[in-house]
Amino acid sequence: MKNKFNPKYLPIVDAIEQHLVGKREIIKLTLASYFAGGHVLLEDIPGVGKTTLAKRFAEVLGLGFGRIQFTSDMLPSDIIGVSYFSQKEGGFILKKGAIFTQFLLADEINRAMPKTQSALLEAMEESQVTIDGKQHPLPRPFFVIGTQNPHEEVGTFPLPHSQLDRFICSFGIGYPDRESERQILKGTYNHQQNDTTTLISAEEISKYMIEVTKVKLSDAMLDYLQSVIAFTRESGLFEYGLSTRGALALTAMVKSWAMLHSREYAIPDDLNAVISAVSLHRLRFREGDTTADRITNEILSSVRSDI
């Protein structure tokens, strides 16, 4: 039986939803991704709230916020920074790029050339950047929300698989439902709180991230998890299955979802809730379109849990 969302996290979700009305599940997925130590990729049309989600999320969690608007003429040094010689100082000085922040909005990342996109790889994997052979740690926790336009738009460069795999989850925000959109049009959806304030401390964030790692996976749950992973690799439906990094991402999200629902152990419902977000950018059907609903239906209708 599904557990209710943990009440201590509800104020975070509520505060963000006041600015992104009707998108509670998207907000919860983003929160789970953050506590799991991953990054999020949002792919959707302009104007549905991708930037709003990022800004409010950073504000509520009290994170330093940085934004990079990717363009085709951007260079890697524009992102990570550059080391230059200063006659005044008598040595080399590091001019830090926008990536030196706790929370980075990488906006329209697929408008940049592949060489520039790759500047994020080391940062997302190791929370550091290398400039002129010297490693520079980034502020922790370091979290990236990347946004991209649909690939069919002119002037975009599809993200390589190595870049996509650095994101723990990928999903779209979508249009609001009719009632939520009515509140938006009336201007009444955020009347309770016009200014978003920090609702969680850095110490609490660290505590919750540690709690995620302590969520238990029973042998039966591990069997279910591995059966899902094996299905993506062996069914023949996909061009390639989940990699080891993808399997670890799925495990981390399952644990994080369990923690957010007041449990110290994971159950099949946790995997069922996050499988499409973890897999959407990692799996491609050999035939037909790849959608979140189709991925979920194919996997969950074919792999059964004995729990």
Image (spheres, rainbow, N blue to C red):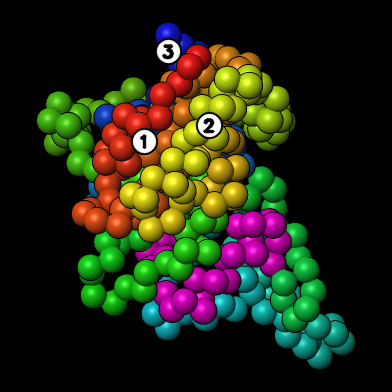
Q: Is residue 259 left or right of residue 184?
A: right
The span shown in magenta is 106-129
The percent position of residue 224, horizontal first and vertical second, equals: 51, 27
Numbered disc 2: secondary structure? helix
Quarter of the image with the N terminus in it? top left
Position above or below: 23 against 100: above
Which residue shows up at 31% across the image and 37% down it? Answer: 298
- Using the rendered image of the protein, determine whether residue 81 is visible from the camera's viewpoint: yes
Amino acid under disc 3: Lys
Position above or below: 124 against 57: below
Which residue shows up at 31% across the image and 46% down it? Answer: 172
Judge depth for marks 2 and 3 and give the one in front: 2
Amino acid under disc 1: Ile
Judge depth for marks 1 and 3 and give the one in front: 1
Near-viewer residue (217 or 185)? 217
Q: Please give the label number shown on residue 299.
A: 1
Seen as rendered, the residue at the extreme bottom is 87
Q: Are marks 2 and 1 in contact (CB under 8 Å)?
A: no
Which residue shows up at 35% across the image and 32% down it? Answer: 302
Q: Please give the label number shown on residue 225.
A: 2
Predominant SS of the magenta segment: helix
Crowd band around label 1 with a 10 angstrom C-alpha radius: few (<14), some (14–19), many (20+): some
Which residue is disc 3 drawn over? 2
Near-viewer residue (301 or 109)? 301
Position above or below: 52 against 186: below
Crowd band around label 2 with a 10 angstrom C-alpha radius: few (<14), some (14–19), many (20+): many
- Using the rendered image of the protein, determine whether residue 52 is visible from the camera's viewpoint: no
Position above or below: 102 against 121: above
Q: Is residue 185 left or right of residue 174?
A: left
The percent position of residue 47, horizontal first and vertical second, equals: 24, 52
